[in-house]
Image (tube, rainbow, N blue to C red):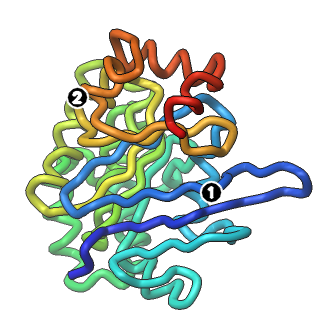
Amino acid sequence: MADSALRVEHLCKSYARVRAVDGVSFHVDHGEIVGLLGPNGAGKTTTISMILGVLAPTAGSIVIEGIDLAKQRSAALAHANFAAVYAPLPGNLTVYQNLRVFGLLYDVPNLPARIDALLKEFELTELRDTKAGVLSSGEQTRVAIAKAVLNEPRLLLLDEPTASLDPAAAETVRTQIRALASQRGCGILWTSHNMYEVEEVCHRVLFLAHGKQLLEGDPRKLPQQHGVRTLEELFVRVARGTADLEERAT
């Protein structure tokens, strides 16, 4: 087993004169949930897109389970999966059909048994034959995460997984995701604008702004280290102006 689920080194992505991601380096260990935080336009989704192989980096390296993404793309991505609110599952397919289609794409062995196990784990058995398009937001999120763990990934990328969910549904999803890390040793990279959620779920956080990496550390300790009371206050400081944080980080 590789020492980390994910290692990103000096990652950059440029568009003409704009650097969307500028020299970002971090890692995600097995069983660890790392929050990738920052205001809109900070470079979070671009970073995730590069890790997924959707975008090619301008510079830097991405290693998933010890496999260099640039050199062995298919082998590296076989160990990863993702879920995001902007990537809904086909609404005209039932829950079971969605899981079957993606299971075939991922070449999941013993697929019927694997789907049945996930339907039970994510409390979707009664929704097995319901079309995804008529599910509630919470139900759709549970299906998306079930899809994301079909291939038993060692690295799971979650982009705003609980956005638009009510508190009860969000807590259910958080509990299931924590179990993926603690019980299966899955490394998880999580983006969220909900700082309460981040503090509750994440072992470590990384703040980005304008494509640059500003802060990294324990979400329960970082605020006090930077002279604020809460993680939300620290987020606001990052969003409104980063000069003082950049000075502290250097």
Residue 32 visible from this viewpoint: yes
Local packing at callout 1 (Cα closer than 10 Å; few below 14, some 14-19, many 20+) is some
Residue 163: give x, y in percent of width and height.
Answer: 45, 29
Q: Residue furthest right?
A: 16
Amino acid type, label 2: Glu
Foreground tag (2 vs 1): 1
Q: Residue at x 69, y 38 (%)?
A: 210
Q: Nearer the viewer, residue 126 or 77?
A: 77
Residue 61 is marked as none
Circles 2 and 1 in contact, beta carbons < 8 Å: no
Q: Residue furthest top?
A: 229
| Marked residue nearer the N-terminal end (2 or 1) | 1
Image side of residue 113 versus residue 203, left or right = left
CA gap, disc 2 and disc 1: 28 Å
User: Does 127 appear above or below 3?
Assistant: above
Residue 79: give x, y in percent of width and height.
Answer: 35, 76
Looking at the rendered structure, the secondary structure element under dot 2 is: helix
Q: Residue at x 65, y 20 (%)?
A: 241
Looking at the rendered structure, the secondary structure element under dot 1 is: strand
Location of the N terminus (image quadrant) = bottom left
Question: Label 1 belongs to which residue?
Answer: 23
Q: Where is residue 187, by image quadrant?
A: bottom left
Image side of residue 113 versus residue 162, left or right = left
Residue 191 visible from this viewpoint: no
Amino acid type, label 1: Gly
Q: Nearer the viewer, residue 157 or 234?
A: 234
Q: Where is residue 192, by image quadrant?
A: top left
Location of the C terminus (image quadrant) = top right
Q: Residue at x 33, y 51 (%)?
A: 145
Residue 200 is marked as 2
